[in-house]
Image (spheres, rainbow, N blue to C red):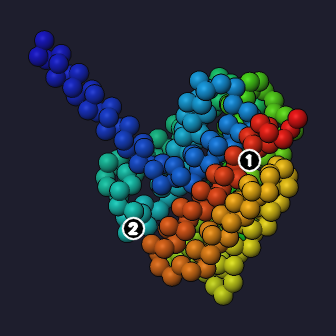
Amino acid sequence: MSVLLSWAKAAVSKTAYTTYTLFLFTKSDIKTTLIPITFLAAASAPLASLSRLPHVIFWIWLHLLQFDVSNQTLDPEEDAMNKHDRPLPSRRISLSQAILLRWLLIPACALLSICYSVETLYSSFALVLFTLIYNEWRAHSGHWLLRNTVNAAGFASFEFGATLTAARDPSKLDGIAILSIAISAGIFLTTIHAQDFKDEEGDRAIGRRTIPIVLPTIARYTVIVPLTIWSAGLSLVWKLGIIETAAFIMLALSVGAQYLASSTVKADQVSFYWYNVWLSTAHALPGYYRLFRSA
């Protein structure tokens, strides 16, 4: 009996250790990817039922894990300098184990996706392709326009699959859902560089050509201007009321002003947090439209 109990304790401990290790791979992208895309999928589909929400979250998280493991196995030395809690620099997993996990996650994502529909599987394949382009084929270290474009395409793949997973019929999306994903891709194309300010020092050290590095004098204005334009445009597209429009635009101006005033890495991290609050709000607007304006 004591042997069986010891075995059970060891199994539970190992499972907990492995689960937490997987979580650490995705920890930094919970606010930037998991939460905003969950908002968009639930609002755009619309969500078939509350019981479907865990499906959506897990689909996004597993594909996010696939991306993050790929990304973090490329330059573990970079993470060792400033991201010590990640699994590789903290030695919770070896590089060879992480690389094996990275390639095993592709069929795992495909198997999960086919449980919903062939169309969801196509989204999974598209995300794998853009992950390869961004990570292994080094688009992440190229010109900022290439990085933004591949980022936008990758997020659109995320959103298409997540929205299908959320929908009553996971084989098709209606016009509102497709429009919301197209708009989101445009938002990412024009604003995703908001994440680059907090990483400017490290990006400069490894030769990346991000907007804060290439366009230092106007870089921070490239956040406040598109956020304000998007806020005004989305207020019209999703037919927000006067009060809602004013609040949304004020949020954009507040986030942009924080970027303009930021002068430290910590301040840029806080600004990026508020950018994701704005992004999640933007992604929730199709739900507002369906509830109050579509009739």
Q: Is residue 279 above or below residue 56?
A: below
Q: Position of residue 206 (x, y in %)?
A: 52, 75
Q: Nearer the viewer, residue 125 or 256?
A: 256
Label 1 element class: helix
- Could you tell me how far apart the alpha carbons at marks 1 and 2 are, in whole angstroms? 36 Å
Q: Position of residue 81 (x, y in %)?
A: 37, 69
Q: Name the residue furthest bottom.
A: 217
Q: Is residue 31 above or below residue 191?
A: above
Q: Quadrant of residue 212?
A: bottom right
Name the residue at 73% across, 54% down: 244
Q: Is residue 235 above or below residue 147?
A: above
Q: Position of residue 85 (x, y in %)?
A: 35, 56
Residue 264 visible, this orientation = yes
Name the residue at 75% across, 43% down: 288
Q: Name the residue furthest left.
A: 2
Q: Nearer the viewer, residue 48 or 252?
A: 252
Residue 161 visible, this orientation = no
Q: Is residue 134 above or below residue 54?
A: below
- Residue bearing the label numbered 1: 285
Name the residue at 74% across, 40% down: 287
Label 2 element class: helix
Which mark, by number, is residue 82?
2
Image side of residue 251 versus residue 149, left or right: left
- Earlier in the chain: of badge 1 and badge 2, it is 2
Q: Nearer the viewer, residue 140 or 159?
A: 159
Viewer-nearest of discs 1 and 2: 1
Name the residue at 31% across, 55% down: 90
Q: Residues within 10 Å of mark 2 (few under 14, many from 20)?
A: few
Q: Residues within 10 Å of mark 1 (few under 14, many from 20)?
A: many
